[in-house]
Amino acid sequence: MKNHTEPYQSKPAVGSFEPTNPERFAAAQKSTWVSIVINLLLTFLQVVGGFVAHSQALMADGLHSLSDLLSDVLVLFANRHGNRHADANHPYGHARVETAATLILGTFLAVLGVGLLVAAAMRLQQPAAVQAVNPLALGIACLALLAKEGMFRYMLAVAKRVRSQMLIANAWHARSDAASSLVVIVGVAGNLLGYTFFDLLAAAVVGVMIAHMGGKLAFEALQELIDTGLDEEEVEAIRQTLLNTHGVRGLHELRTRKMADNALVDAHIIVDPKISVSEGHYIAEAARHAVLKHHHVLDVMVHIDPEDDLQAKPNAHLPSRPGLLAHLAERLGEHDLAGKRVVLHYLDGKVDAEIYLPVNQRLAEQADALQASCDALVRDDEFFRVIHVHRNHAQK
């Protein structure tokens, strides 16, 4: 039996947008728009300033800032669509949009880093081709460095506060921009001092750093997209929460997978096989709510087992209720089971049965005979292991 409440509840009105996490959505929108404005200003300043100051490095950094505008637009798109409520086609929500955006950003950073490394290597082959630059380029590069570093610290603080992997990726993207601005500063300063190779060596080092950072972000996002589980410590904590729930006798097949900054959990819990279905459902609900309360989990699916089905014999080969009752009636012969309540327990490849006799003096007198027939039946029966007859029990 599975106990599961779908995240999908209802869809907002057509044409409306209501984020699942308003705080995260608002913070992401604000920080991304700040980044867009700064990158727009820096792009204009660096490209125009680089052209006027004859600095190829500054102009390249301006194009780098222009690429940031494109990534910021991607973040806005992912933030809006990733915060949409669950719907019929996406019952678990749209959080994976954020993960996909993180993968794209990480890949972009990796490609950018490799590009800087290759460009630096090519320029090292022709150091004489680098022109002398105007000191104005140094001032613009310093201003860009301060702006990018400030933006990185601001965006990272916001990302950690709202626990957004995508915003963390975008913040580190800003840090990579600050590193490239530092390269420009070193390069321009070296150029002004006559050591043009300083710019090229620094560009190569930063290219490796950016490629490593982008590769790490892309790898982590890819791990999430292929349903990599939570770390061992968090899984063990969830296991203990489930086992501490009253009525849970054991646990197996605990599985987890990340979904953006949340997680999805599946678990099989073992309960007393003779309790009612409603009590088993109650225990599953209690276990589910305990995990949701104490862990950063989006949803939990709890499967109730009367025994450890990894160790017990399978029951799938056994007949269903109609087949078992027909078999039981045939083997008991003269004992009529019509009107009697029969409870079946499928356990360890066999069936334990309980027969409840209604309040009837004549039937009660036949209970001993019926029990004796049942005891004889189970000695060689292929389906039944134990049969208990309960007398003088009110029929339900």
Image (spheres, helix red, strand yellow):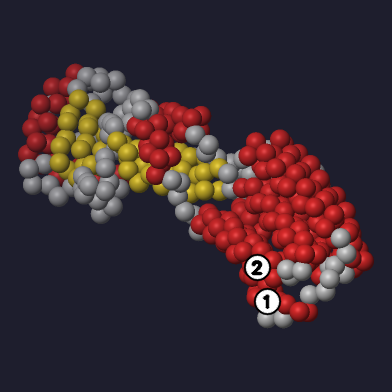
User: Who is closer to the viewer here, 186 or 150?
Assistant: 186
- Going 74% across and 70% down the picture, which residue do you hit? 196
Q: In the rendered image of this protein, does residue 52 appear above or below residue 80?
A: below
- Going 26% across and 40% down the picture, which residue do you hit? 307
Residue for badge 2: 201
Q: Residue 315 in the image: state x and y as whole percent.
A: 26, 49
Q: Residue 339 in the image: state x and y as whole percent.
A: 29, 32
| Any part of residue 132 in sight | yes
Q: What separation in Å lies between label 2 and label 1 (alpha carbons)?
A: 8 Å
Residue for badge 1: 124
Dot label at residue 320: none
Left or right relative to 345: residue 193: right
Q: Amino acid at mark 1?
A: Leu
Q: Are there few (<14), some (14-19), or many (20+) residues within 10 Å of tag 1?
A: some
Q: In the rendered image of this protein, does residue 316 appear above or below residue 290?
A: below
In the rendered structure, are the residues bearing label 2 and label 1 in contact, judged by CB atoms less than 8 Å apart? yes
- Going 76% across and 58% down the picture, which residue do you hit? 185
User: Who is closer to the viewer here, 173 or 119?
Assistant: 119
